[in-house]
Image (cartoon, helix red, strand yellow):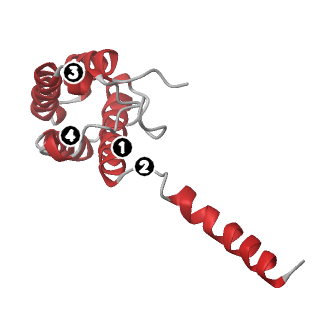
Amino acid sequence: MKPLTLFAAVAIAFSAPMALAQDGPSAQEKARQGMMRIMALNMGVLGGMAKGEVTYDAARAQKAADTLVAVSMIDQSNLWPEGTDNDSSMHTGALAAIWEKPDDFAKAWMAFGEAAKGLQAAAGNGREALGPAMGGAGKSCKGCHEMFRAKPK
C-alpha cells in the first residue's frame, strides 16, 4: 500500500467514529430524556409504595413527590426545539404533534404538574392515600404519551 493511500485509510478509519458521535442525541434530547427518567424513577417509588410492593416510608414518599413537583416546574421551552422529533432523530420518541399542537402539549405538561401536586399532598398521609393520587398522575402521563410519544419499537 502506498504511503498516501495508507494515510487516507487511517484518516478515514479514525474520522468515522467522530462522524457517528455527531449523530448522537442533542443536548436538549439528553436533558428531556434525563428528566423523564427522573420522573419514571420517582413514579416507580410511589407506585411501588401504593401497591404495597415497597414498604411505605412517609419521608421517602414525600421526597419522591417533591421531586416530581420540582420537575413539573422545569421550563420546557428549551427542551423541545423543532427538529428533535422521532422523524428527525432516531434518539427520541417525541412525535411531531408536540410542535403541531403546542397548546395541547403545554396543557398536558400542566396536567402533570397538577397531578404531581396531588401526589405531594398525599405522599405523607399513608399508603392508602397514594393510590388515588397515583391514579391521577398515571392518567396525566398516559394522556401525554398517547398524544405526543411514539410507541417504542
| CA distance for labels 3 and 2 | 21 Å
Whether the residues at callouts 1 and 2 have beta carbons within 8 Å, the answer is yes
Residue closest to the far bottom: 3
Judge depth for marks 2 and 4 and give the one in front.
2
Tag 2 residue: 25
Judge depth for marks 1 and 4 and give the one in front.
1
- Up the image or down, 59 lies above or below 16; here it is above
Question: Residue at position x 20%, y 18% from top?
Answer: 136
What amino acid is found at the position of numbered circle 3 in the picture?
Answer: Glu
Name the foreground residue: 42 vs 90.
Answer: 90
Neighbour tally class for label 3: few under 14, some 14-19, many 20 plus, Cα within 10 Å: few
| CA distance for labels 1 and 2 | 10 Å
| CA distance for labels 1 and 3 | 20 Å
Name the foreground residue: 4 vs 96.
Answer: 4
Question: Residue at position x 46%, y 41% from top?
Answer: 91
Mark toward the start of the polypeptide (2 vs 4)? 2
Tag 1 residue: 33
Mark toward the start of the polypeptide (1 vs 2)? 2
Q: Secondary structure at mark 2?
A: loop
What amino acid is found at the position of numbered circle 2 in the picture?
Answer: Pro
| Residue 98 seen in the current view | yes
- Up the image or down, 21 lies above or below 57; here it is below
Q: For the N terminus, give its image quadrant.
A: bottom right
